[in-house]
């Protein structure tokens, strides 16, 4: 890693307009250490910085009878992402950046003691910059991230130990 100090400020505010309703706004900076393999001299041409993101979330939660509903939107900016160099030099660089925007709707129900089911739909749009390999020295360009999953539907049934505190379940 680069040896620099990473400072990750985060903040959030929640407003409860009714007993079973919560609206929230959260945001902050999140960083991660580079994968250890990228710090080996064979993989890098110098110290790599910690990749980081700035994230913002706006959402709401409602409890209606036996159901929990949640809807949220988010925006994420990615910075100092580690990319393999493609300019003829072996190694990696912190030249990567990108954006991701999305929304998710979620419904959850406790089926019985410890058995929980939830259904969610998520939409996501992710872009990242990259070097254009068709021309030497070409500037960065934006493209859709190839591992992007723009639509996801999930149905999950799980057993949760009812003895666990609520903040873990």
Image (cartoon, rainbow, N blue to C red):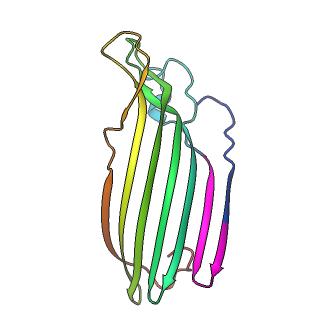
Residue 23 inside the magenta-drawn segment: yes
Q: Position of residue 83 (x, y in %)?
A: 43, 28
Q: Nearer the viewer, residue 4 or 98?
A: 98
- Seen at 37% across and 59% down, the residue is 122
Residue 148 falls left or right of residue 104: left
Q: Position of residue 125 (x, y in %)?
A: 39, 46
- Seen at 62% across and 53% down, the residue is 27
- Seen at 32% across and 72% down, the residue is 156
Magenta-highlighted residues: 14-29
Q: Residue furthest front?
A: 17
**For residue 113, above or below residue 47:** below
Q: Nearer the viewer, residue 17 or 167?
A: 17
Q: Quadrant of residue 25?
A: bottom right
- Seen at 57% across and 35% down, the residue is 50
Q: Quadrant of residue 26?
A: bottom right
Which quadrant of the figure contains the N terminus? top right
Residue 18 falls left or right of residue 127: right
**For residue 64, above or below residue 142:** below
**For residue 112, above or below residue 126:** below
Count how many numbered circles sit on residues in the image.
0
Please identify the dominant SS of the magenta region. Answer: strand
Residue 112 inside the magenta-drawn segment: no
């Amino acid at each position: 890693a680069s040896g620099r100090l990473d400072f990750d400020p985060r903040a959030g505010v929640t407003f409860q307009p009714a007993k079973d309703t919560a609206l929230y706004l959260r945001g902050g900076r999140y960083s991660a250490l580079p994968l250890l393999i990228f710090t080996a001299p064979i993989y890098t041409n110098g110290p790599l910085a910690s990749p980081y993101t700035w994230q913002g979330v706006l959402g709401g939660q409602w409890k209606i009878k036996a159901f929990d509903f949640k809807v949220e939107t988010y925006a994420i900016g990615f910075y100092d992402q580690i990319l393999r160099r493609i300019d003829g030099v072996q190694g990696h660089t912190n030249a990567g950046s990108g954006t991701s925007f999305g929304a998710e709707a979620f419904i959850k129900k406790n089926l019985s003691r410890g058995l929980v089911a939830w259904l969610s739909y998520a939409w996501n749009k992710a872009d990242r910059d990259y070097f254009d390999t068709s021309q030497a020295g070409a500037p960065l360009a934006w493209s859709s991230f190839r591992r992007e999953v723009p639509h996801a539907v999930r149905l999950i049934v799980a057993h949760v130990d009812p003895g666990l505190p609520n903040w873990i379940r």
